Image (spheres, rainbow, N blue to C red):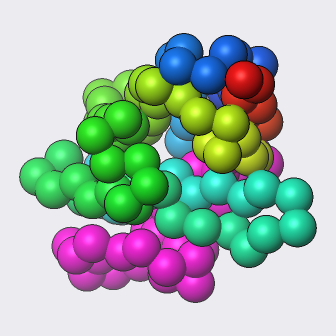
Amino acid sequence: QVQLVESGGGLVQAGGSLRLSCAASGRTFSTSPMAWFRQAPGKAREFVATITWNSGSTYYADSVKGRFTISRDNAKNEVSLQMNSLKPEDSAVYYCAGRWSEGSRGVYVRVDEYYYWGQGTQVTVYS
């Protein structure tokens, strides 16, 4: 059974930085693309960033491009999201997600393309 556990959320002033981490267990971490999504109150869950199984490709939502960086360490079974220049509109619960579906060598950005989710970590940015 896959477990994804996020950490690193918190309260930060606009312009500041946070680093989210997600620890994975239960499956071979290196075989799955990983992603971060977020969900603000009253809004649908939205894609933030994804990284392929071998870190060969990354892809970002336009709203975070140039400010957020996704990375992974397959030796540590961990994926991270470095968030810089944070804005109040970045406030949301951030979720880590993985696929672990055979042949997952592409870039996946939809909620329904990920089958395993963490419990989420709250990020609040105040102005």
Q: Could you say where residue 11 lies in the image, as x and y percent from the top left?
A: 77, 19
101 w.r.t. 121: above or below = below
16 displayed left or right of 69: right
Question: Magenta region, mostly helix, strand or loop?
Answer: loop
13 w.r.t. 98: above or below = above
Q: Could you say where residue 30 lies in the image, as x and y percent from the top left?
A: 30, 49
Q: Could you say where residue 85 lies in the image, as x and y percent from the top left?
A: 45, 25
Quarter of the image with the N terminus in it: bottom right
State the residue lying farthest toward the front: 127
In terms of image quadrants, where is residue 77? top left
- Is 1 or 81 nearer to us in this picture? 81
56 displayed left or right of 46: left
Residue occupying image coordinates x 73% and y 59%: 39
Total count of labels: 0
Quarter of the image with the C terminus in it: top right
Q: Is residue 7 magenta?
A: no
Residue occupying image coordinates x 39% and y 61%: 61
19 displayed left or right of 127: left
Q: Which residues are magenta?
A: 94-121
Residue occupying image coordinates x 69% and y 68%: 45
State the residue lying farthest toward the right: 42
Residue occupying image coordinates x 44% and y 55%: 63
State the residue lying farthest toward the left: 56
Is residue 119 visible to us here?
A: yes
Q: Could you say where residue 48 lies in the image, as x and y percent from the top left?
A: 48, 56
Is residue 4 visible to us here?
A: no
Q: Is residue 101 magenta?
A: yes
- Is 91 or 8 nearer to us in this picture? 91
